[in-house]
Amino acid sequence: MREELLDFERQLWARANDAGFYRERLTADAVLVFPAPAGLLERDQTIEAVSSSRGWREFELDDFRVVTLTERSAMAAYRANAVRADGSSYSAYCSSVYVQADVGWQLALHQQTPIAGSST
């Protein structure tokens, strides 16, 4: 499960401007929690935001941990270090909650806490 969810997270970061990918991977009631000004985004708001995202030139996901919640749900936590195309850097502690559906793992909740000194 750990490798499967790590791969899922890597895809979310790698495809940060691919609205179709997010549309397939978010639960119907998904909530994403980002630093201001974005704040709390529901599924449709997230897909719209992804459409205009600058994406990431490179990223690393470190200290990746998984906690099994139920037979069909899990939580991942990790540190992300990323660089945008313009060279600005971003570091955050992240957590995601997944549920397993007929189509595979889907993201129900994602949260990012920026690390002091990083830009968004």
Image: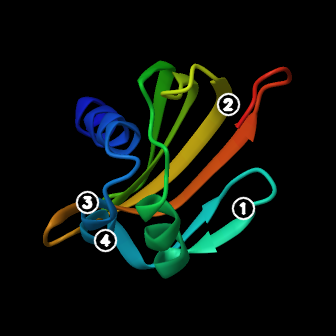
Q: Evaluate if marks 4 and 1 touch, with contact meaning CB atoms under 8 Å apart.
A: no
Which element carries disc 2, helix, strand or loop?
strand
C-alpha gap between disc 2 and disc 4: 24 Å
C-alpha gap between disc 1 and disc 3: 20 Å
Q: Evaluate if marks 1 and 2 touch, with contact meaning CB atoms under 8 Å apart.
A: no
Amino acid carrying mark 3 in the image: Phe
Residue 92 bears which disc, if any? 2
C-alpha gap between disc 1 and disc 2: 15 Å
Q: Residue furthest right?
A: 116
C-alpha gap between disc 3 and disc 4: 5 Å
Residue found at x 57% / y 19%: 87
Q: Is residue 41 above or below residue 114?
A: below
Image-quadrant location for residue 102 = bottom left
Amino acid carrying mark 4 in the image: Arg
Amino acid carrying mark 1 in the image: Ala
Q: Which residue is mark 4?
A: 23
C-alpha gap between disc 4 and disc 1: 18 Å
Q: Which residue is mark 3?
A: 21
Which element carries disc 4, helix, strand or loop?
helix
Pick whichever, 109 or 86, lies toward us. 86
